[in-house]
Amino acid sequence: MSVFLLGGGRDLARCGDLLRPFVAEARQRAADRAPVIALLLVLEADDDSSVARFTAMLEAAGAAAGEIRVESIVEGEVYAASALDADGLFVGGGLTPAYLNAFGRIGDAVIHRVLEGVSYAGFSAGAVIAAAPALIGGYRVGGVEVVSEDASEELDEVEVRPGLGLLDFAVDVHAAQWGTLSRLVAAVDAGLVTDGVAIDEDTALVVSAQAAPTVRGSGQVWRVESAASGVHVQVLRA
């Protein structure tokens, strides 16, 4: 099993290509039957496009329509453990705090499913909440702006909350496109997290127990960690 962290993006073909190994792992787990890929979405009340968009993304990754089971809820609702009965879990994007709240009752169950061999793919918000220290948003640290308010996820101060725990480092997304690398740097500098990655759009970081983490896609992954001299940033490329 692997954990696929996608930094976002609007290009369905590019994002679909990044998800092809995820779909392949779900098929491998299913063996001689059709796999079940759970598409978990937390929607705004008036959102009528995300289901079609993320379904098309999985289809671009090679998933058949009959292999995708949509599990969509509205912001403020929470998932039941039965939503995780699948060979692959694809958690989409949207308002990050709402996604984290939606998994509040079944966080441990997600870990158990992944340990059982179910692959996890997170897109934007889905990638952020996969971490143990979930950097869910905010645009100020100590009242000082560290990123555009447009990337705040409707929060003021940068917040780190307990996430799903699939990773021991923090994740931020839309790095080059939204400028969120500066938020992660500020969070490390302030001691809110010890280390993390900021992932560009159309880019994925793949974490597996069987191999070293790898970068796929057209962008970069920015590795940020605390250092004796302050904060150290390393650029990782495909």
Image: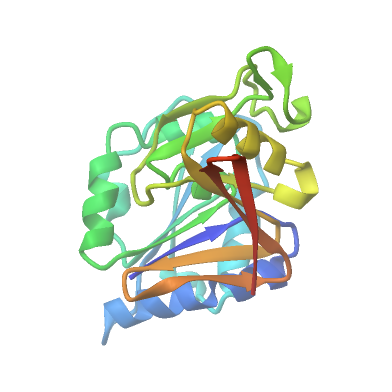
Q: Position of residue 67 (x, y in %)?
A: 42, 71
In the foreground, 76 or 65: 76
Q: Position of residue 136 (x, y in %)?
A: 54, 32
Q: Is residue 178 left or right of residue 2?
A: right
Q: Position of residue 79 (x, y in %)?
A: 35, 38
In the foreground, 180 or 223: 223
What residue is rendered at 44% in x and 34% in y? 100
Q: Quadrant of the N terminus?
A: bottom left
Q: Is residue 222 left or right of residue 78?
A: right
Q: How is the image coloured?
A: rainbow
What residue is rendered at 46% in x and 24% in y? 76
What residue is rendered at 50% in x and 30% in y? 98
Q: Is residue 123 above or below residue 103?
A: below
User: Quick check: can you spot residue 74?
Assistant: no
What residue is rendered at 61% in x and 18% in y? 157
Q: In the image as oriented, which residue stretches furthest toward the top? A: 143
User: Quick check: can you spot residue 152?
Assistant: yes
Q: In the image as oriented, which residue stretches furthest toward the bottom? A: 32
**In terms of image quadrants, where is residue 24?**
bottom left
In the foreground, 89 or 210: 210
Q: Quadrant of the C terminus?
A: bottom right
Q: Is residue 144 left or right of residue 171?
A: right
Q: Is residue 55 above or below residue 139?
A: below
Q: Position of residue 123 (x, y in %)?
A: 56, 53
How many marks on residues?
0
In the foreground, 119 or 168: 168
